[in-house]
Amino acid sequence: MTVHVNDNCIGCGLCVNMCGNVFLMTEEGVAAARDEIFPEQEAPAQEAAESCPVQAIEISE
């Protein structure tokens, strides 16, 4: 699974709060996803993507 945060991100930090093992805040004040996603992180990452208020998280298999 790969996770990407697109340019829609408004830096609300919801994804980081929900799944800090996958998402982090950059120096620019927006979220980014870590490169390696482990199987146990897939469900929380998917939940964060579904909760994102601006649909900035893209997930692909």
Image: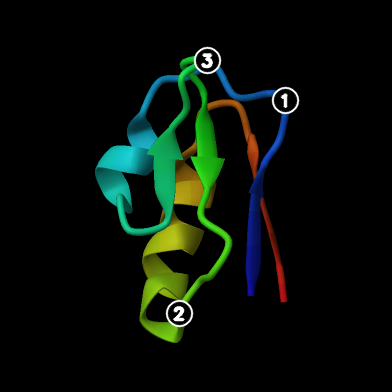
On-image quarter of the N terminus: bottom right
Badge 2: residue crowd in 10 Å (few <14, some 14–19, many ≥20): few
How many marks do you count on the picture? 3
Asked if the residues shown at circle 3 and circle 1 are in contact, with their CB atoms under 8 angstroms apart, the answer is no
Q: Earlier in the sequence, mark 3 or mark 1?
A: 1
Instruction: Compare residues 26 and 54 and report the one nearer the observer.
Output: 26
Residue 39's x, y, as percent? 45, 84
- Residue 42 is situated, as x and y percent measured from the top left of the image, at 47, 73
Quarter containing the C terminus: bottom right
Q: Position of residue 35 (x, y in %)?
A: 58, 61
Name the secondary structure under disc 1.
loop
Residue at 46%, 16% (x, y): give it. Answer: 29
The residue under the point 45% across, 60% down is 45
Residue beneath label 1, please?
Answer: 7
Crowding at label 3, few (<14), some or many (≥20) Cα neighbours within 10 Å? few
Residue 24 falls in image quadrant? top left
Name the residue type under label 3.
Answer: Glu
Helix, strand or loop for disc 3: loop
Q: Residue furthest front?
A: 27
Where is residue 55? Give x, y as percent.
Answer: 63, 35
Labels 3, 2: front one: 3
Amino acid type, residue under disc 1 in the picture: Asp
- In this picture, is 40 found above or below 12? below
Please state which of residues 33 and 44 is positioned toward the viewer in this rendering.
33
Residue 38 - label: 2
Characterize the local packing of mark 1: few (<14), some (14-19) or many (20 or more) Cα atoms within 10 angstroms: few
Give the left or right position of residue 22, taking residue 8 as reference: left
Q: From mark 2 to mark 1, how far is it between C-alphas?
A: 24 Å
Vertical order, 49 against 29 (above or below): below
Q: Amino acid at mark 2?
A: Phe
Q: Which mark is residue 28?
A: 3
